[in-house]
Amino acid sequence: MTRGEGVRVSVVDSGIAADHPDIDGVNLDLSKNFSGDGLGVGGPYGGYHGTHVSGIVAATDTNDLGVVGTAPGAELVDCRVFSHGGGAPFSVVLAALLHNVEVDSDVTNVSLGAYSPRSDYVDDGRFGRFYGRLLNRTLTHAKREGTLVVMSAGNSGADLQRDKRWLSLPNEGAQGLSVAATGPVGFGWGAEGRREPYRSPAFYTNYGTNAIDLAAPGGDADRSTIGTGVPWHRDLVLSTVATFERGADGEITGDPTYGWDWAAGTSMAAPNVSGAAALVQANNPEFGPERVESALTRAAEVPEGYDKSYYGSGYLNVVDAL
């Protein structure tokens, strides 16, 4: 039906390796480095993570290499908030979201997060209210101006609905899509009794009624099999990666190495939804973020026998959304 052509997806992360042989269409003119390290954009300067996420969104289908993204025709924008040292101020993440509104991104993928005390526990609520109000205003502005923000739900196995002490950010902000992770166990190796379907909740995913909007593939694992010789890694997500060689002081000492590798997390689930949103947007150019979101959530269903708190509206169904 569509490859996602004409749709712009921004990736707020550790950087996209724009020269990776399996990634095409990174708009470097609209990309921006928010990390303050001076290294620019279009490289995996903050690590492999952003390239892995970007491959899930839009790895190209025009070659015979590696993998194919959910929306291989979509345009990518690199909004790098992480440097090699890791970590990013919350204000920098929000600045990246505002930048994506300014460059008319249709979808913004945010596969990152942290935990903040809820307002009742710190400074008589001032700390929590500051983050909540600032985040909600930013997300509301983004949606109003035409950008759908898709966010990973987090990997702590926490019930976000019942946790009264900690707030998961940014995914518990209003007006964004919070995505939990599912994954198989025993894909291509498991014996009977040691299998879980690909729609089953991943062991690590955060969950919670009204805290999760959708669930999508993020990979899973039978942790008891790690190190036993079975190919447990097949239950993870294979995507594009790139890394730099670095010296003892962390300085880059050569060109990046490109490849493919396995990873799992709600970080991998969110870009599946971002890619699906890009397909819906491409097929319906007149849609705004609300209608794209509605198409995704209305098409989704909670798998029979599973707890709704892991799925929100349900498991991602790209074909029915289209």
Image (spheres, rainbow, N blue to C red):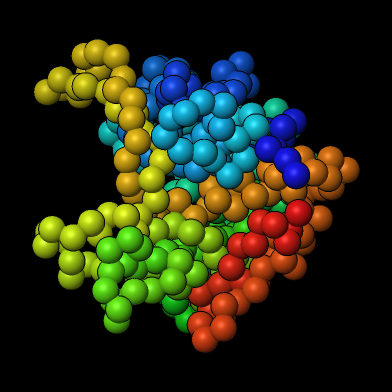
Residue ID at (27%, 54%): 233
* Residue sticking out furthest to the bottom: 305
Tally the marks: 0
Measuring from the top left, give residue 296's x and y in whole percent.
70, 60
Measuring from the top left, give residue 75's x and y in whole percent.
64, 29
Q: Quadrant of residue 202?
A: bottom left
Q: Is residue 120 above or below residue 293?
A: below
Q: Is residue 292 above or below residue 88?
A: below
Residue ID at (62%, 71%): 314
Q: Is residue 196 above or below residue 253?
A: below
Measuring from the top left, give residue 14's x and y in whole percent.
41, 34
Residue ID at (42%, 64%): 183
Q: Quadrant of residue 232?
A: bottom left
* Residue sticking out furthest to the top: 254
Residue 73 or 10: which is nearer the viewer?
73
Residue 266 or 235: which is nearer the viewer?
235
**Left or right: where does residue 113 sit relative to residue 189?**
right
Q: Is residue 231 visible?
A: yes
Residue ID at (68%, 43%): 278
* Residue sticking out furthest to the right: 286
Q: Is residue 133 visible?
A: no
- Assign the N terminus to one quadrant of the image: top right
- Assign the C terminus to one quadrant of the image: bottom right
Measuring from the top left, give residue 47's x and y in whole percent.
33, 33
**Left or right: where does residue 297 sit relative to residue 308?**
right
